[in-house]
Amino acid sequence: MILACHNISKSFGDHVIVRQGSFHIEEREKAALVGVNGAGKSTILKMIIGEETPDGGDITLARGKTLGYLAQHQDLLPGGTIYGELKSAREDIFEMERRIRAIELELKSLTGRELEERLETYNRLQSEFDARNGYACESEIVGVLKGLGFSEEDFSKKTDTLSGGQKTRVALGRLLLTTPDILLLDEPTNHLDLNSIAWLETYLINYPGAVFIVSHDRYFLNRVVTKVVEIENGEIRMYSGDYRAYSEKKQQLRDARLKEYFNQQREIRHQQAVIEKLRSFNREKSIRRAESREKMLEKITPVEKPADTAPEMHFSLEPSCVSGNDVLTVEHLSKQFDGQPLFTDVNFEIRRGEHVAIIGDNGTGKTTLLKILNQVVPADSGAFTLGAKVKIGYYDQEHHVLHNDKTIFDEISDAYPSLNNTQIRNTLAAFQFTGDEVFQEIRSLSGGEKGRVSLAKLMLSEANFLILDEPTNHLDIASKEILEEALNNYSGTLLYVSHDRYFINSTASRILELVNRTFVNYIGNYDYYLEKKEELTRACASAPAAGAAASSSPASSDTGAKDPGSRLSWQEQKEQQARERKRKNELKKTEEEISRLEERNAQIDHEMTLEEVYSNSVRCQELASEHAENEEKLAELYELWEMLAE
């Protein structure tokens, strides 16, 4: 065991982060720390590194072990270069090499005992240099930099000139090269493109030490981790396996607890009804039997109903009208910045109902294409045409569609003046903005909060063609799943840019990869894209000339995509996923209706104790009838829930 947290507790005022939570990390183990936004994941990492002090409990790092930490925001030393920053992680190796070279120069002028001593030092340093793979040090630095998406032209860039995302990538590279015994990584895939994320996955899988990761990238977690540590409502639980195994096990446990709760509630209600009936007979024998059943009821240990993990967004996307079959036609489109071409002579079409994901490396022009389609920036040449009755809804990852000087309420009110106050507040409540929160200024919001405001505007737009730029950025996993569900149930057309492979896999029916300044078309989701990409790579390796032609031609990938067997298998998979989503939707709605009716009956029970009610026979009768109707509905809902849960 390399790291152990035992009975740790932490609160900020009345807000409890964790209470008596325990978990451990084994040597070489790859583990994830998951939870909703604000659950306390970053706080736990900061307690481990000593930036925050726990209120109670013990945090133990194995003796002699080193720890490295990557925060979400980085401050690099001023005046350095990208290469220099990573080189500093191996400064001891370079210092050793300088000493070796200095001794080599000294040896020429030494004799006798002095020569022997210097040779002994030289041989010792040379042996250690070899053992630490010193000769490969520079190539390892170059490999990490290129793996994280930096070109050789970038190596000499000053760190002072870098964006926040670039600084995080530099800090990540420097941390990886220090090779601590345990890596603590807070959102390491932020600001990485798909190729860099894939490189990091492989690096971490083969990393000789332990890794403890906070991430909302489910695809990444499925590839890397073998254990999940969950923080939820101040409690910590451990699950074996990757993220998918954790998610399934968590749902199974919740379903089992909920089923146990509903079964007990049904039995209690049944016994209470029997007791009431026995007492209504008003005979000594029936009253004794009723009392016996009451004693049995008193001995029952109540099963607590599983609490919802956190307030969730709940929304649906519904177009106000149906567009024509041809939604978008792009012809001979080209764009360059500062003399550097992004894409050239691009042609593609999008049909009604398609869900199209655009993928590609950072800087290839994906976001620029979306901005051209939304007429934010002009194209250099070419044109695009929207089909009949097409109404665009645009989600901008930089949230330029929002106004920093407005409040959340005014942002919605000004964009949709036909809505009244109640409608605006109900809409914002669906996106977790309640009470005075709706009067916060946009400029004061976090990235995730701005994203929720943008999604609220998108929902209200009733557009039939959604164009989304990185819609899952800053969303926690629960919110991503809600967005996925809304998009999968959306009957309009969807075009989006994303680096979230799990999200792409769940929502895309077609992928456009921007590579070599043009688009390659794949008919399928992300798993299908990987399969066909691998086939193209093998084809290129075996026949370079033919492969080069295939990789630059959109038609080649379409041909592969129409393989009947693969297509049928993928279609069946999508249908199965759709059925499962429908079941979960109905299950959730049933649970919500049960909760609503139970709360209403509790309210009726309270009202019946009020003098102004129990003294009013008409009102009493009305409430009793409503209570009885609710009980009948609850009995039906319990049976429906059990059927759906199974």
Image (cartoon, rainbow, N blue to C red):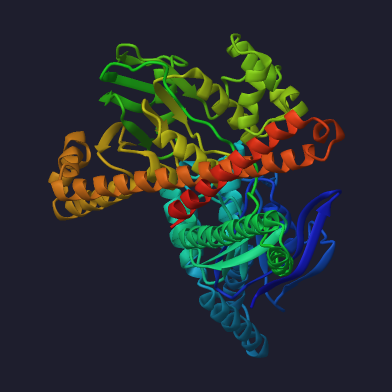
> Considering depth in this image, is 207 or 254 the residue closer to the camera?
254
Q: Residue at x 84, y 66 (%)?
A: 56
Q: Residue at x 19, y 43 (%)?
A: 561
Residue 198 in the figure: left or right of residue 116: left
Compared with residue 78, is residue 20 higher up or lower down, i.e. above or below?
below
Compared with residue 615, is residue 110 higher up or lower down, i.e. above or below?
below
Compared with residue 181, is residue 326 higher up or lower down, i.e. above or below?
above
> Considering depth in this image, is 344 or 9 the residue closer to the camera?
9
Looking at the rendering, which quadrant does residue 608 occupy? top right
Compared with residue 90, is residue 491 higher up or lower down, i.e. above or below?
above
Residue 235 in the figure: left or right of residue 362: right
> Considering depth in this image, is 550 or 458 the residue closer to the camera?
458
Residue 136 seen in this snapshot: yes
Q: Residue at x 13, y 45 (%)?
A: 546
Residue 501 seen in this snapshot: no
Residue 327 is situated, as x and y percent measured from the top left of the image, at: 30, 19
